[in-house]
Image (spheres, rainbow, N blue to C red):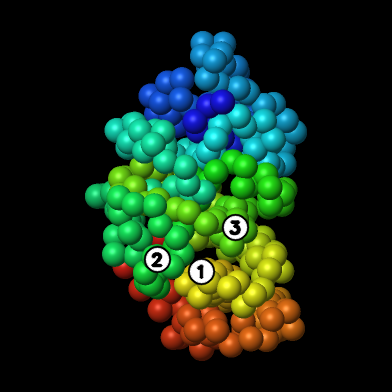
């Protein structure tokens, strides 16, 4: 068994996938790299097969019809042999020094979830996103030991390394042909996580800058229906109020609050009669599904304020936190 399976969902990634693959190869025999060619129309498959031929004991290639990012993650999870499971997008990469620390740490521990820092890589100085002051360091901990997350602090796909068996035991299967399913990937397993460890290293390098990226503002406006779909899916997964641990329950509500915020603000940015109707429909959906949860959406409620308040507020938050 490998220590960590890294899955790289790849669609038309020939221009930049080398960096992601090469950065993980530093892990040597402890890692497994599963490159999922998701129906690419460029040289992605050829590049992947060349790597597999050169590193047959480390790299596996899955060639499949296009199904979207979630489909790629699903395919990788099906064949992953690693004790732990990590998704790396094909335009991102990992810090090589941090990877060695991750491997060293996981060889000594047995935890359900390892949490690491991620770095926004964009023009200017990279911005490190950490969990200092929120998560204990240098010890295994539980939800009882977790501090309060700030409004801008969340666990993202970039920062989580789950135990593979947990993802399989809960039957994780992400929606296909849908963007933003990484939110489901992080959120769904959390109630099943008992032990965690936080490694304060700048492990995941998250590139922001391509005009066609899913987090580009204009792209997000165009795909806002998929964001809404993911938000509704998360609402339906389980009722946070049935979660016994108070700190975990608060974090789950915190996550859903942000999902409602993002969905509402991008529907507002679309600024059409149809998008205005969809805002009402989304909030009615939440109120019907979980009235108690709807009352807890503190941040999201601010997006219901008039546009001349809510839109500048979003612009200011984006400038401060540099999240897309």
Q: Which residue is mark 3?
A: 192
Q: Is residue 231 above or below residue 75?
A: below
Q: Earlier in the sequence, mark 2 or mark 3?
A: 2
Q: How far across and how far down the image is residue 308, in percent? A: 45, 85
The residue at the point 59 percent across, 36 percent down is: 9
Residue 252 visible in the shown view: yes
| Circle number at residue 146 | 2
Secondary element under disc 1, as helix, strand or loop, is helix
Residue 89 visible in the shown view: no
Secondary element under disc 3, as helix, strand or loop, is helix
Q: Which residue is mark 1?
A: 248
Q: Residues within 10 Å of mark 3 (few under 14, many from 20)?
A: few
Q: How far across and how far down the image is residue 51, in percent? A: 53, 17
Q: Residues within 10 Å of mark 2 (few under 14, many from 20)?
A: some
Q: Earlier in the sequence, mark 1 or mark 2?
A: 2
The residue at the point 40 percent across, 57 percent down is: 141
Q: Residues within 10 Å of mark 1 (few under 14, many from 20)?
A: some
Asked if labels 1 and 3 touch by Cβ distance under 8 angstroms, the answer is no
The residue at the point 34 percent across, 47 percent down is: 199
Q: How far across and how far down the image is residue 260, in percent? A: 58, 74
Q: CA distance from mark 3 to mark 1?
A: 11 Å
Asked if labels 2 and 1 touch by Cβ distance under 8 angstroms, the answer is yes
């Amino acid at each position: 068994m490998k220590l960590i399976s890294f899955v790289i969902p790849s669609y038309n990634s020939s221009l930049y996938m080398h960096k992601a693959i090469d950065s993980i190869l530093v892990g040597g025999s402890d890692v497994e790299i599963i490159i999922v060619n998701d129906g690419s129309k460029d040289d992605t498959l050829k590049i992947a097969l060349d790597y597999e031929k050169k590193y047959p004991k480390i790299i596996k290639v899955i060639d499949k019809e296009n199904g979207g990012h979630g489909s790629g993650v699903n395919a990788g999870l099906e064949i992953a042999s690693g004790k732990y499971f990590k998704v790396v997008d094909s335009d991102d990469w990992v810090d090589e020094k941090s990877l060695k620390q991750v491997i060293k740490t996981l060889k000594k521990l047995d935890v359900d979830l390892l949490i690491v820092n991620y770095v926004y890589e964009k023009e200017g100085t990279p911005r490190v996103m950490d969990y200092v002051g929120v998560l204990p360091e240098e010890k295994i901990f539980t939800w009882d030991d977790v501090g309060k997350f700030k409004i801008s602090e969340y666990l993202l796909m970039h920062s989580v390394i789950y135990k593979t068996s947990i993802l399989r035991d809960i039957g994780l299967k992400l929606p296909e042909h849908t963007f933003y399913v990484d939110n489901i990937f992080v959120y769904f397993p959390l109630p099943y996580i008992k032990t965690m460890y936080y490694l304060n290293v700048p492990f995941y390098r998250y590139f922001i800058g391509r005009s066609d990226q899913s987090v580009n503002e204009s792209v997000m406006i165009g795909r806002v229906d998929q964001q809404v779909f993911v938000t509704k899916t998360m609402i339906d997964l389980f009722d946070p109020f049935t979660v016994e641990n108070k700190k975990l329950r608060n974090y789950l509500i915190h996550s859903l609050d942000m999902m409602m915020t993002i969905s509402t603000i991008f529907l507002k940015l679309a600024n059409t009669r149809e998008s205005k109707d969809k805002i009402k429909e989304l909030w009615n959906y939440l109120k019907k599904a979980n009235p108690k949860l709807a009352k807890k959406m503190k941040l999201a409620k601010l997006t219901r304020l008039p546009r001349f308040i809510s839109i500048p507020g979003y612009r200011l938050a984006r400038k401060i936190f540099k999240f897309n």
